[in-house]
Image (cartoon, rainbow, N blue to C red):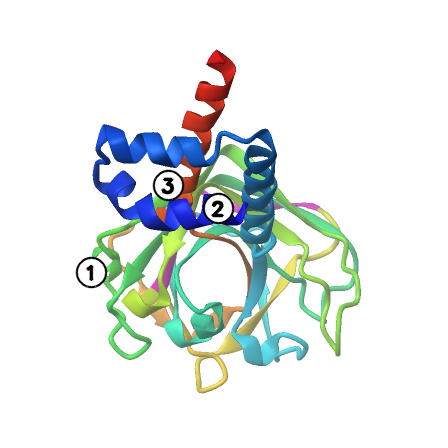
Amino acid sequence: MKRFLRTITRYSSPIGTGATPRELYHAVAACASPRMIISLIIALGCLQWTVCAQAGSIVVPGAYATTESNVALYRENLPPVRFQMLYEAAEFASLGGPVLITGLVGRPHAQQSSPASVSVLNFDYWLSTTNRTTSTLSPIFDDNRGADHTLVASYDPAYVFTTANIPGPGDTKEFDVVAMFSTPFRYDPAAGNLLLEVRTDGTMLESGTEFLTSGCVTGPSCPMRMVISIGSADATSGVYQDVGEIDLFLYEPVPEPASWVLTLGAVLGICTAVRSRK
């Protein structure tokens, strides 16, 4: 295995940029041993497991991860709505770089009295990276969108949100109001703030007596702001609301393998082909 790694180190640059037949031959010859091939498979498997293990979640805003706010957002029996919610990038700094956002999870407010469910009609989620801030957010929806504006989830004719209303850490409830995205969104906090856009033709309470989710008032501990239009999902502008929803973002690492990983994979394929012909 040491001989194999030394050879890969020597030839990884030429292979990655177009190796000569002689260089490729020496690289293949170095891994002709079945023991070396098996070792490489195990190493690549461990690498893949390590990357997958980095998937996780983050509460935004973090100040309310285990603390309830005094803002309860009503989600039942609403008319058509279009709104945008801005999350400042500083809330995602702990991620350390770009991620793929795969879902969004809200939590019932402490005032929620029982388990409940609500139907959301013709429901669309969009995400983008924006240069707008809580102080420069525009009442014109299109002015806030980033160039990477992406439809991440679309539920037609309806999507049913549920909550089991389970106690959580501190004085909060568990995050269990789940919306998974069919299209993961690549978000890099270094590129700007995160903008969520939601459009729906309305909501209807299906069970329970109310459906309240946790929110917070815009400020240092809640670096979020909303623009909302009630009455039309196709409105072009809305009004400011100095509130935000407390959410749990689900994410996975961005699959950006280093060049040496690609080289190892390529050589493994070549080695396997060579061995099979012997």
Q: Which residue lies furthest to the top in this view?
A: 277
| Callout 1 crowding tier (Cα within 10 Å): few <14, some 14–19, many ≥20 | few
Q: Residue 263 carries which label?
A: 3
Q: Please say if the residues under marks 1 and 3 sit with CB atoms less than 8 Å apart.
A: no
State the separation of the CA atoms marked 2 and 1: 58 Å
Q: Earlier in the sequence, mark 2 or mark 1?
A: 2
Q: Is residue 80 above or below residue 227?
A: above
Q: Would you name the residue on which mark 1 appears?
A: 143
Picture coordinates of residue 85 (x, y %)?
40, 64
- Segment tinted magenta in the rendering: 194-206
Q: Which amino acid does label 2 sit on?
A: Arg
Q: Which residue is drawn at 45% across and 70% down?
A: 92
Q: Which mark is residue 3?
A: 2
Q: Quadrant of the N terminus?
A: top right
Q: From the viewer's side, name the closer residue of 138 and 36.
A: 36
The secondary structure that most of the magenta stretch takes on is strand
- Magenta highlight on residue 202: yes
Question: Please, what secondary structure does the residue beneath circle 1 have?
Answer: helix
